[in-house]
């Protein structure tokens, strides 16, 4: 689907959900020597990840490109799941990264790094407590219950690039939630749901964490990424079920995040088994 530029939107068409200010975002984020080179806001597209992967693969986008959509009609989650929400109700964006100086074996940390950056940025800009569900979900608390308010998806773009997409429910109301288990920043009591400062806060946090990780050649210990992710991970200390490829599942206590970013489960058989991919279901506190 061809993106539609946001410039033809009236700022007064939805007073509760005004459009993002692309010019202000560029002024606040694009600077000499910084990570972010360009920020484009489009009115609607199928998926910012799909669009940015295509641009990067064709050599039409460089590291630091940011593509934001006011609406996604075919947003993607893990395992080809759909991510949909009303226009202007959330933040839907993708960034292009090229960590050439980091060994490819450590690139698997990028979704977890992005989770840390999103959680850190939102705690500052929205004043809402968030937690991370391994590997790529952002959780908030609504009415005493854990709910998913965001997700992260990383995709390779050619040989050297990685596109990381983020979707966050900001102002969704209960009657707009796609499933009862979903949540939003507004429902979690955020002190601010103004998307402009929220996006700036997230991208500045991502620039900070990415720079730290890259300077450490992707070492999750030296960059303090492993420790910080574990501290904010709601999955650790829980009894969980890992649903793995091939219709296999493992149940056990999530006890650690290892050096490769994998979730380590302690099973009833006394075995510690690392999980690198799969769906995680929180069962109960251990």
Image (cartoon, grey):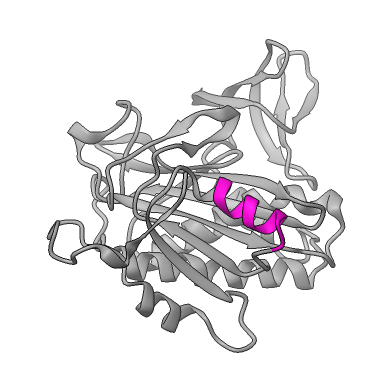
Q: Residue at x 60, y 72 (%)?
A: 208
Q: Main secondary structure of the magenta part?
A: helix
Q: In this orientation, does residue 226 appear?
A: no
Q: Residue most toward the bottom?
A: 32
| Count of residue discs | 0
Q: Residue at x 28, y 48 (%)?
A: 87
Q: Percent from the top left, x then y, of residue 249?
A: 67, 14
Say above or below: 144 vs 109: above
Q: Nearer the viewer, residue 273 or 23?
A: 23
Q: Nearer the viewer, residue 64 or 176?
A: 64
Q: Is residue 181 left or right of residue 131?
A: left
Q: Nearer the viewer, residue 118 or 99?
A: 99
Q: In this orientation, does residue 242 appear?
A: yes
- Quarter of the image with the C terminus in it: top right
Residue 203 magenta-highlighted: no
Q: Residue at x 62, y 75 (%)?
A: 35
Q: Percent from the top left, x then y, of residue 92?
A: 42, 52
Q: Magenta part of the protein: which range?
A: 50-59
Q: Percent from the top left, x then y, of residue 171?
A: 24, 49
Residue 51 magenta-highlighted: yes
Q: Percent from the top left, x then y, of residue 210?
A: 66, 66
Q: Residue at x 73, y 44 (%)?
A: 261
Instruction: Determine which quarter of the picture holds residue 102.
Output: bottom right
């Amino acid at each position: 689907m061809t993106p539609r530029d946001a410039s033809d939107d009236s700022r007064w068409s939805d007073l509760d959900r005004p459009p993002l200010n692309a010019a202000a975002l560029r002024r606040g984020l694009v600077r000499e020597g910084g990570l972010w080179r360009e920020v484009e806001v489009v009115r609607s597209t199928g998926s910012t990840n799909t669009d940015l992967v295509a641009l990067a693969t064709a050599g039409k986008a460089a590291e630091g490109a940011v593509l934001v959509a006011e609406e996604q009609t075919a947003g993607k989650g893990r395992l080809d799941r759909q991510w949909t929400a009303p226009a202007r109700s959330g933040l839907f964006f993708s960034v292009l990264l090229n960590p050439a100086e980091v060994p490819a074996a450590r690139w698997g940390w990028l979704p977890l790094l992005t989770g840390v950056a999103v959680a850190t940025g939102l705690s500052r800009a929205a004043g809402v407590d968030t937690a991370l569900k391994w590997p790529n979900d952002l959780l908030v608390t609504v009415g005493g219950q854990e709910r998913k308010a965001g997700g992260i998806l990383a995709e390779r773009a050619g040989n050297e690039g990685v596109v990381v997409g983020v979707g966050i429910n900001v102002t969704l109301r209960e009657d707009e939630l796609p499933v009862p288990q979903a949540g939003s920043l507004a429902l979690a009591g955020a002190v601010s749901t103004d998307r402009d400062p929220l996006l700036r806060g997230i991208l500045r946090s991502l620039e900070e964490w990415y720079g730290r990780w890259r300077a450490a050649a992707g070492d999750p210990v030296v960059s303090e990424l492993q420790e910080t992710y574990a501290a904010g991970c709601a999955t650790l200390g829980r009894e969980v079920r890992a649903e793995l490829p091939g219709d296999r599942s493992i149940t056990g206590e999530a006890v650690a995040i290892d050096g490769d970013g994998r979730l380590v489960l302690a099973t009833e058989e006394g075995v510690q088994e690392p999980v690198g991919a799969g769906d995680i279901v929180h069962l109960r506190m251990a």
